[in-house]
Amino acid sequence: MKHIVLFDMDGTLTPPRESLEESLIPVLEQLAEVAEIGIVTGSTYDYLKQQVGVLLNHSKIRKKLHLLPCNGTKHYYPPSNNYEEHKLISEVSMIEKLGRRKFTQLMLLLIEQQANFSNERFPLTGHFIDYRGSTINWCPIGRNAQAEDRQFFVDYDNSFKPTLRETYLGRLRHYTSLKNIDGLTIKLGGDTSFDIFPEGWDKTFCLQHFPDHTHWFVGDRCGKNGNDKEIYDLLKKKDKAFETSGPDETRILIGLIINEVKKFL
């Protein structure tokens, strides 16, 4: 029986928007001896490589490593040797799914909401809306924000009850319904943004790439509105999903999963 252990990235394998912690490499090498590894994230392939690029230099991990950006709607398969790039073997299109008219309406709505959000008291750094082919990420402070600006926003956001992002999440869901832009899932993404994608294109989408595997999952945002919730809830029913508080706890959970997988070998 084949096994694949799927990890969220930000807050699970790495601190938000930072590189993989070196302390995880030895235990990931041990995991690669008994299972394949997948990193499923809402981020793009380029961001994924920036954050976990150190793994691409480890041959034991590299040949077992599946890169699954945009919630796994894109699948980069491990190369056959250490000299090749991961190969894109599967992707889907949000524009084709929604149609150009609905997609354009959605983009105009996000621009309108960005204008409203920009009246708040936090730094703005540009590149607010990122269309990723199969998903959209809207980051009201800008995706190029520095760590201190991101933390300022997080503190400011959490000073509201409900948080500012939760309020805008409700607005987005209301206005997309009002404008008949249906068939969407809108969730909080990371600490500062929103993820928008067609229904069913959450992280459970990646499971179809591995029909002959037993699936395991580790993520940090598994509660209401979190972008790990669907895959966590699905695999938790089989006792194969774990919620983590960060890379340190993830390292412990990997050791636990290794022991569980070995029982099947």
Image (spheres, grey):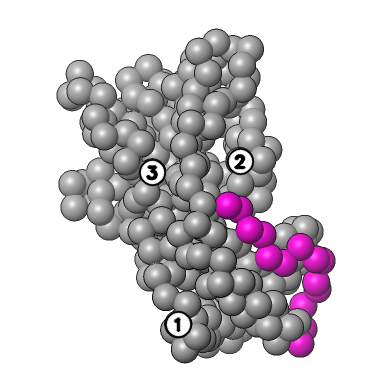
Is 12 above or below relative to 23?
below
10 Å neighbourhood of mark 1: few (<14), some, or many (≥20)? few
Foreground of the two, 192 or 99? 99
Mark 2 or 1, nearer chain start: 2
User: The disc labelled 2 sits on which kind of residue?
Assistant: Tyr
Query: Which SS class for mark 2?
Result: helix
Magenta segment boundaries in residue numbering: 119-133
Query: Which SS class for mark 1?
Result: loop
Q: In this figure, what is the number of numbered marks?
A: 3
Q: Is residue 197 left or right of residue 137?
A: left
Q: Residue at x 48, y 31 (%)?
A: 89
User: The disc labelled 1 sits on which kind of residue?
Assistant: Asn
Question: In x, y percent, where is residue 99?
Answer: 51, 65
Q: Which residue is mark 3?
A: 206
User: The disc labelled 3 sits on which kind of residue?
Assistant: Cys
Question: In x, y percent, where is residue 23?
Answer: 56, 31
Magenta highlight on residue 205: no
Q: Which residue is mark 2?
A: 45
Mark 3 or 2, nearer chain start: 2
Is 156 above or below relative to 206?
below
Front disc: 2 or 1: 1
10 Å neighbourhood of mark 2: few (<14), some, or many (≥20)? some
Label 3 close to label 2 by CB (< 8 Å)? no
Question: In x, y percent, where is residue 73?
Answer: 46, 46
Mark 1 or 3, nearer chain start: 1
C-alpha distance separating marks 2 and 1: 31 Å
10 Å neighbourhood of mark 3: few (<14), some, or many (≥20)? many
Q: Residue at x 51, y 52 (%)?
A: 93
Foreground of the two, 109 or 36? 109
Q: Is residue 51 visible?
A: no
Q: Which residue is mark 1?
A: 180
